[in-house]
């Protein structure tokens, strides 16, 4: 996956930088990240952010969903 510019919409650069540090501390560099989250009060609207292209971010989420479903009891 090729790295693209980090979006400045709802800037989460500080969060991304902290996550990079976690990956680096575990011996990984230049991770592709896709983060999904919801916010209170109703938790019904999903937000997401990636540090890769939109298409690559969608693929990361697709693969993650497939893995999560396969590991469901």
Image (spheres, rainbow, N blue to C red):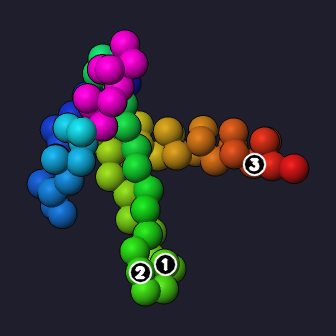
Give, as a single range, the part of the protein colored magenta.
19-27
Whether the residues at callouts 1 and 2 have beta carbons within 8 Å, the answer is yes
Outermost residue on the right side: it is: 73
User: Where is residue 8, by image quadrant?
Assistant: bottom left
Task: Name the residue carrying label 3.
Answer: 69
What predominant SS class does the magenta segment belong to?
A: helix
Whether the residues at callouts 3 and 2 have beta carbons within 8 Å, the answer is no
Outermost residue on the front side: it is: 25
Q: Is residue 39 above or below residue 27?
A: below
Camera-nearest residue between 50 and 19: 19
Q: CA distance from mark 3 to mark 2?
A: 25 Å
- Please, what secondary structure does the residue beneath circle 3 have? helix
Q: Is residue 68 left or right of residue 29?
A: right
Outermost residue on the top side: it is: 27
Query: Image point 38% across, 65% down: which residue?
Result: 47
Task: Name the residue carrying label 1.
Answer: 43
Q: Which mark is residue 40?
A: 2
Of the 4 image quadrants, the one containing the N terminus is: top left
Q: Position of residue 10 (x, y in %)?
A: 18, 63
- The tag earlier along the polypeptide, 3 or 1, is 1
Q: CA distance from mark 3 to mark 1?
A: 21 Å
Residue 49 falls inside the magenta stretch: no
Query: Image point 27% across, 31% down: which residue?
Result: 20
Residue 20 falls inside the magenta stretch: yes
Q: Is residue 1 above or below residue 36?
A: above
């Amino acid at each position: 996956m090729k790295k693209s510019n980090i979006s400045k919409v709802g800037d989460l650069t500080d969060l991304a930088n902290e996550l990079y540090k976690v990956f680096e501390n575990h011996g990984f560099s230049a991770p592709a990240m896709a983060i999904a989250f919801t916010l209170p009060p109703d938790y019904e609207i999903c937000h997401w952010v990636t540090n890769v292209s939109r298409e690559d971010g969608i693929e990361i989420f697709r693969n993650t969903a497939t893995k999560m479903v396969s590991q469901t009891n």
